[in-house]
Amino acid sequence: MLPPPSDPRPRRQRGALLPGLLVIGLLLAGVVALDPESSIRNLRRIAGIEGGRLGPAAGSVEGAGSYRFLQTQRGSDEPVAYNPCRQIEVVVNPDGAPANYDELVDTGLARTGAATGLRFVRVGLTDERDVDSRPGLAGRGPVLIAWATPEEYPELAGRVAGIGGSTAVGFGGRMRYVTGQVILDRDLFASLEGRGTDEAQAIVDHELAHVVGLDHVDDRGELMYEYTGDRTTYGPGDLAGLARLGSVAC
């Protein structure tokens, strides 16, 4: 969540052979039931059809900076993240969006993808607006990016510029993000048109970092600073945190 620039507030023999195969099949079914994602991944590797990461992981970032994760795996400091072996599909609802929304979305996805190594793919436009009935526990779905007003989406009240986040689902004791959304204040973005793209782009990038798993920090040198700051691009801590989010195992 990021407040607008003018606001100081916070912003997943054959007879003998058949019984043996049956036992193996039952055992495999049991293993898959216990840990579906990792078991299916291992079976795909054995069969030679596991594609691995879709892109190289971002390198570690040196230098001072701070970052926090929205969620970590139980009993660990490993972040909950998207699966880097699956592309993250994105749909955009252009209703109420600024004229340059394509540029803002494409730039934000490119920057966040480069910082994490995750692969974002825009799969079209949508008229979907009901964020409360999005996929998640019911299944995977594209990340939604939309513009709205506080009347439609109350969390935008209080001059909040945007809301971003993802839904995590458990797979064999581990959590994965499977879908997410970014909801942006349409009136604020309308007011930023004609003033350059830096401020509007910073809001989009900030919310996309929430989608992949970064939380707010108290460091003014980071884009994930909770309040409006001078930075309009990812800082050293942001980049270090994003690199970790993109470096988790498939």
Image: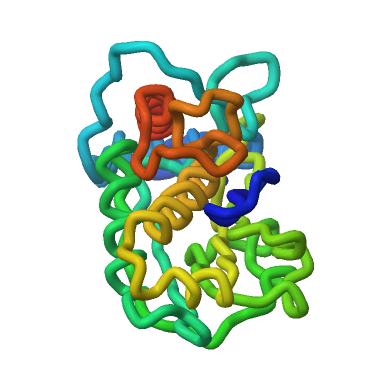
How many marks the image carries: the answer is 0
Q: Nearer the viewer, residue 233 or 127?
A: 233
Would you say 195 lies left or right of 181 here?
Answer: left
Residue 249 visible = no
Q: Nearer the viewer, residue 203 or 239?
A: 203
Q: Residue at x 66, y 30 (%)?
A: 173
Image position, residue 37 (x, y; %): 52, 40
Image position, residue 179 (x, y; %): 55, 57
Colour scheme employed for the rendering of this structure = rainbow
Q: Nearer the viewer, residue 106 or 116?
A: 106
Q: Residue at x 35, y 67 (%)?
A: 195
Where does the C terminus fall, quadrant-wise? top left
Q: Quadrant of residue 29?
A: top right
Q: Quadrant of residue 151?
A: bottom right
Q: Quadrant of residue 237?
A: top left
Q: Residue at x 56, y 75 (%)?
A: 186
Would you say 109 lies left or right of 28 here?
Answer: left
Q: Residue at x 57, y 54 (%)?
A: 6
Depicted 126 relative to depicted 13: above or below: below
Image position, residue 53 (x, y; %): 27, 39
Would you say 43 lies left or right of 157 here?
Answer: left
Residue 217 visible = yes
Image position, residue 194 (x, y; %): 34, 74
Depicted 20 relative to depicted 148: above or below: above
Depicted 133 relative to depicted 5: above or below: below
Depicted 38 relative to depicted 102: above or below: above
